[in-house]
Image: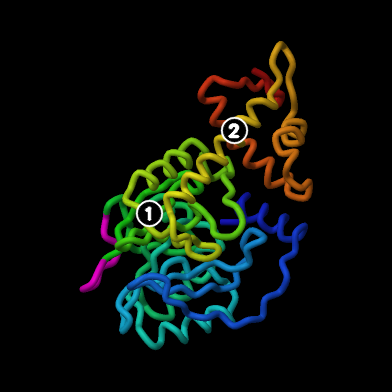
Amino acid sequence: MGESPVEALYEQVRAAVPVAADHAPPTLLQVFPGIRVLALRTPTLPPAAHTNVYLVGPDAGPVAVVDPGSPYRDQQTVLDEVIGGVGISRVLLTHHHGDHVGGAAALAERWQVPIAAHPRTAERLAGVVEVTQLLEDGEVAFSWQAGGATCVFTPGHADGHLCFEIGGATIAGDMVAGLGTILIDPSEGDMALYLESLERLRARPQSMILPAHGPPIPDGHAKLTEYLVHRRMREQRVLDAVPTGGGSAMIDDLVATAYSDTPRVLWPLAERSLRAHLVKLLREGRVRETLGRWSR
């Protein structure tokens, strides 16, 4: 399996928007009872430069490790040193993107533990990371005397995306971010499903959201509402940019109009999101596409 379109785009954006080097050593922090986090450097989407690795379970271990995404040996060594003090029972993956799975295979091999993920994530990772345990919506992925991690299926950003609920906290993967943005790329994601998944999470009991990038989000419902409002605003801007009355426009023209509030250096990223919105609008019969030109 070669580099995915999403990962190629991340690389393009990193080249255009370099992130300042951060040489501070990763620090293990308690963010919720039974949940600790270690932010490791990964090739992710700027302005983020790290992916949060969550250690779930009792303080004395063993723990489940969620999204060991760093491919860098120095970062993997830090994680190994932490795990050496508590032990590990399994690796859990929220989805298949490289900044979430970059260290998963090496970690599982070193510690001889299984990797668990949704079946669609397993399919995406075939030949790259061997998923040995399949997880479904509502299943308890890992449990200990004081709690457990329950799977919540949240497709949209990726077709096999899972969140993990642990008491009053939700490890949310790339559903929302504490730093940066969430890309919905039509090659691997689905805007309609993503919005449905945001609604599904918001309909569940209030919880602290623990994102893959950035700090914890104490008011999870408020953040989910913020994301829904923003995506609907952007969808309306995309729809308004599509000509009516017999006119039509190419993708580049639509990006310039619908994302005029976005720095031009980020327009390649904006184009992918715009295409995801257009796919949704096309399915709903609200826009038309003819030979690459869009109209209403």
| In this view, 290 is above or below 187 | above
Residue type, mark 1 in image: His
Counting from the top left corner in percent of width and height, residue 191 is at 52, 38
**Residue to which mark 1 is pinned:** 118
Q: Tell me: 44 left or right of 76.
A: right
Q: Which residue appears at 34% of the width and 76% of the height?
A: 63
Of the two numbered discs 2 and 1 in the rendering, the one whose residue sits closer to the viewer: 2
Residue at the outermost top position: 245
Q: Identify the main secondary structure in magenta.
A: strand
Q: Which residues are magenta?
A: 139-147
Q: Which mark is residue 235?
A: 2
Q: Quadrant of the C terminus?
A: top right
Residue 274 lies, with reference to residue 48, above or below; the image says above
Q: Secondary structure at mark 1?
A: loop
Q: Residue at x 59, y 48 (%)?
A: 183
Question: Which residue is drawn at the image coordinates 27% and 52% (left, top)?
Answer: 138
Please state the horizontal and vertical placement of residue 186, each as a whole percent of the image: 57, 40
Q: Amino acid at mark 2?
A: Glu
